[in-house]
Amino acid sequence: MDIVVIGAGIVGAACAFHAASAGLGVTVLDRGPVGAGTTSRGEGNILLSDKEPGPELELARLSRDLWDEAGEELGPGKVEFENKGGLVAASTPEGLAALHAFAARQAAAGIQTERVDRLDAFEPHIAPGLPGGVHYPQDAQVQPVLAASGLLRAAVRRGARVRTGEALAAVTGTDGRVTGVRTADGAVLAADAVVNAAGTWGGEVGRRLGAPVAILPRRGFVLVTEPLPPMIRHKVYSADYVAHVASSDEGLETSCVVEGTRAGTILIGASRERVGFDTTMNPAVVALLAAQACRLFPFLRDVHLIRAYRGFRPYCPDHLPVVGPDPRVPGVLHACGHEGAGIGLAPGTGALITAQLLGRPWRGADPAAHTGLLPDRFLTTGGVPK
Ligand SMILES: Cc1cc2nc3c(=O)[nH]c(=O)nc-3n(C[C@H](O)[C@H](O)[C@H](O)COP(=O)(O)OP(=O)(O)OC[C@H]3O[C@@H](n4cnc5c(N)ncnc54)[C@H](O)[C@@H]3O)c2cc1C
């Protein structure tokens, strides 16, 4: 079977890697360079800690196992893969009780959680006086662009082809069945199936494939400090982050996630705003994120920011990615809408798409276990998830 994957971000790369590993003929098409979409605009958190039990957590668990495998294949150092664990810190006793209740539900779903009374035993520089938190040893970190390009290189070693600088124009087909795609330059690529891994642009690509899906942009800013000696050991974030991830509020939400990188810089994320594809810098958001980070780690007050960048998370109104065959156009599969978790969820998505193409489980991905992510959920509601 030959497939075309639209999008050379982390999700398209993971789809290509798994499909090529399974022996499928794979061509990856991107209108820009590898990893230049949202994959280059976020952080590299691989989180189980922020996910409610349900379809997304199941995909995250699968992905977490596959990240270990991918890290080994790509070379952990080469993609800055670190099993560093996450620490969620509550700021009030009520917040701590809610966090404990959330963690208990996750533990029942098979996630490793550990109550922490003394946060400074995990993070010596964290603000004093915080009531406690939860440690999630399975949380990890990767450098997203290095990971996407590493996965694509591994796919190419298995026979995949990558065509950058070429945009999808339309799907081709006969008798209602996909036969390939046509690029904006007029090239025709024959394929038995097309995978929409176009991230935030998955809605537009879905339309071109005759299978629209409701994917929208959710803007986020990330701040970067000057390089420092190691000061922060885990991924550390405040307990209200989880509520903001799941929220559907239109307005600005900020709750900081703080983490060190191999280069010594500290990344401070991440705001959430629904402002379309507005690329304007918002100094008020930068100031809010910085203030929250300083409350969590007071030493940051004396540290310089060297830059801030922003990106657009691809979100579905029901906050779940869309992964699977589109019943309206046989041969079209979607793998998009991963919002603020696409780096973490990429390997599981690639394995699940491959399993759906093969019609049997692949690398622990059983299509029957992930039906909550199928695009079917769009169809009864006129294109908008229930
Ligand atoms: C501020 C911020 C922080 C984040 N932090 C994290 C985090 O810590 N952990 C995490 O897991 N996730 C995080 N994310 C989310 C994560 O970055 C995304 O979910 C992920 O990058 C999506 O990857 P993708 O491959 O689906 O999309 P993309 O990386 O956007 O790739 C899609 C590709 O499709 C291509 N494309 C679009 N249209 C066409 C066309 N017509 N023809 C050909 N190609 C096309 C684009 O050029 C692009 O390269 C964050 C996001 C933001 C904005």
Image (cartoon, grey):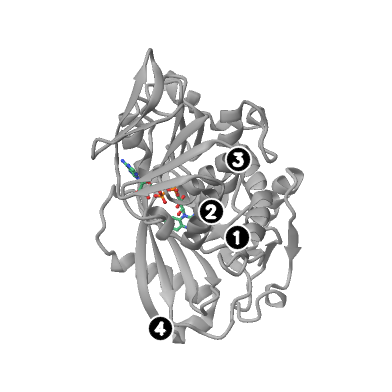
**Figure quadrant of residue 279:** bottom left
* Residue 216: % across, % down: 36, 41
State the CA–CA distance, disc 2 to disc 1.
7 Å
Mark 3: amino acid? Ala
Residue labelled with disc 1: 74
Q: Residue 306, percent across and down?
A: 37, 79
> Is 163 positioned to the left or the right of 128 in the image?
left
Q: Amino acid at mark 1?
A: Leu
The residue to which callout 3 is attached is 351
Q: Residue at x 53, y 57 (%)?
A: 241
| Residue 162 position in % (x across, y down) | 42, 48
Answer yes or no: do the residues labelled 1 and 4 have beta carbons within 8 Å?
no
- Kindly report the distance in space between the C-alpha atoms of the residues bearing marks 2 and 3: 13 Å
Mark 4 falls on what kind of element?
A: loop
Task: Say which residue label 4 marks.
Answer: 304
Circles 2 and 1 in contact, beta carbons < 8 Å: yes
Amino acid bearing label 4: His
Q: Amino acid at mark 2?
A: Leu
Where disc 3 sits, the SS reads helix
Residue located beneath label 2 in the image: 151
Q: Classify 352 as above or below 166.
A: above
